[in-house]
Image (tube, rainbow, N blue to C red):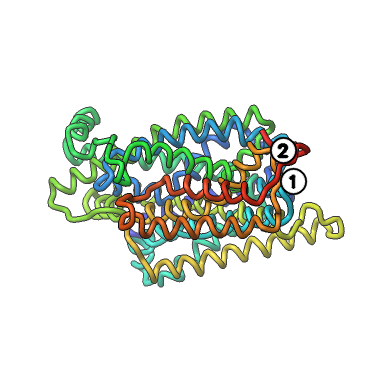
Amino acid sequence: MQIIIFTCFVIYTIVIFLVTWLTTRKANNESFYIGNRQSPWFVVAYGMIGASLSGVTFMSVPGWVDTRAFSYMLTVFGYFLGYLVISFLLMPAYYKLKLTSIYQYLELRFGFWTHKTGSFFFLLSRTLGASLRIFLVILVLHEFVFSYWGFRFELTVVMFLFLILAYTLKGGVKTIIWTDTLQTTFMLASLIISVILICKAMDMSFGEMFTTIKNSRYSQVIFTDNTSRLCWWKQILGGMFITISMTGLDQEMMQKNLSCKNIKSAQKNMFSFSIIIIFVNFLFLFLGAALYLYAAANNIDVKGDELFASIAINHLGVGAGVIFIIGLISALYPSADGALTSLTTSFSVDFLNLEKRTDFTEKKKTHIRYVVHSGFALLFIAIIIFYEQHRSANLIDILFRIASITYGPLLGLFVFGLIMKRKIQDKLAPIVCVLSPVICFILSQNSLKWFNYSFDFELLLLNGLLTFVGLLFISKKNNSVSLHV
């Protein structure tokens, strides 16, 4: 089976590089950063499905069903509310100011130090989060495929990151909106076929499987215990603010939206994407419940992140294994290509100020961008190898905890800037933005013992609120402020 999977991987990679070749002709720095603002909105919307789901969703959401049942659907409904806020509050501001990096808004609104602080928190969060997503996928691919030929884990990591670096280096956003479209197609096809195969393996139709899941303990959506992490209002609020932060305040996701021709196209993209993602996440949960039912019926002791991979490869036959691996590879590439591109953009624009450097030729700017892009790829490799040496269970839970800590300051900064007509002491902003996540981290570690309360996604909201209050303390009224709602 490994030879079949490896052959599919080679063919898949060749297709990716063919798309890259077609899209990078006449590409320049503007193509890399914002796709020359010529991306079709429907292509962006479709490709964002794969980019937003990632390999962690592909592996961990089905595995989550055992401990969370279908409560994650409330988080997904919260996502939808968050996408509405992004469409009608954040994106109009970004388009009006013609931003390349969304963190340029912070400099226009507050000043130099706030701008650098916001960009730093994005770089930190995206680097840790994206490398965690990539790690999970590469780990599975290594264990089930490349270790068969005696590859060391480190070599597998270097190989994949080199491939991703190669096809994103020149075209950036102009390339990945098209490669993400291809990869989303393969990921969704893999998901749908996997659902069909598990139903077939249990000799059930989709309707029969739906009824069986509905009557099982896995179908519970609403939990009412306020002290529980799964409480319904925590899921909705957390989903809403996770979306606002991890999409609306995230350079990777917004960079693709900013590549659309105008704000109306970008809003159509966001609204279409927000509807589709509800059904896709439901399918992942449905698949997870079906996999657990199959495991129980066949006395298979596997849970969490290993559930989907183990059953698909070891129990459902060669075809299911190949379908799973193709879906996983399709989840890997969007997780890494968009992250590399957005990190390069943010560092180049926010810290190196390449866009405004009139003393640099276009050729020199491109050379510097290549170096930055390669540097982030090397950083990913180092962090992924570190993760492998300190492996932990249920990575999607860790991923959301990282987001709750690192995106909180961004949430507080942008909300304050957009709704308050006050000017802050710019040099004090970094102190506020560091203190807030530190307080939240301490609370998350001790809240159950201190208050008999367990934080989940709403920790992000508290983090943003503390940042907002801190900014209020270091601000004063200023009626001349013009960049608020």
Give percent across and percent down for residue 466: 52, 49
Res 338 visible? no
Between 217 and 21, the one lying in front of the other is 217
Give percent across and percent down for residue 66: 24, 47
Q: Is residue 256 above or below residue 446?
A: above
| Residue type indicated by callout 1 | Leu
Q: Residues within 10 Å of mark 1 (few under 14, many from 20)?
A: some
Give percent across and percent down for residue 52: 48, 44
> In which image quadrant can residue 209 be found?
top left
Between 118 and 352, the one lying in front of the other is 118
Q: Is residue 188 above or below residue 18?
A: above
Asked if residue 255 lies left or right of residue 305, the reply is right
Q: Quadrant of the N terminus?
A: bottom left
Residue at 40%, 68% in the rendered image: 388
> In which image quadrant can residue 395 be found?
bottom left
Q: Which mark is residue 483?
A: 2
| Residue type indicated by callout 2 | Leu
Residue at 61%, 38% in the rendered image: 257
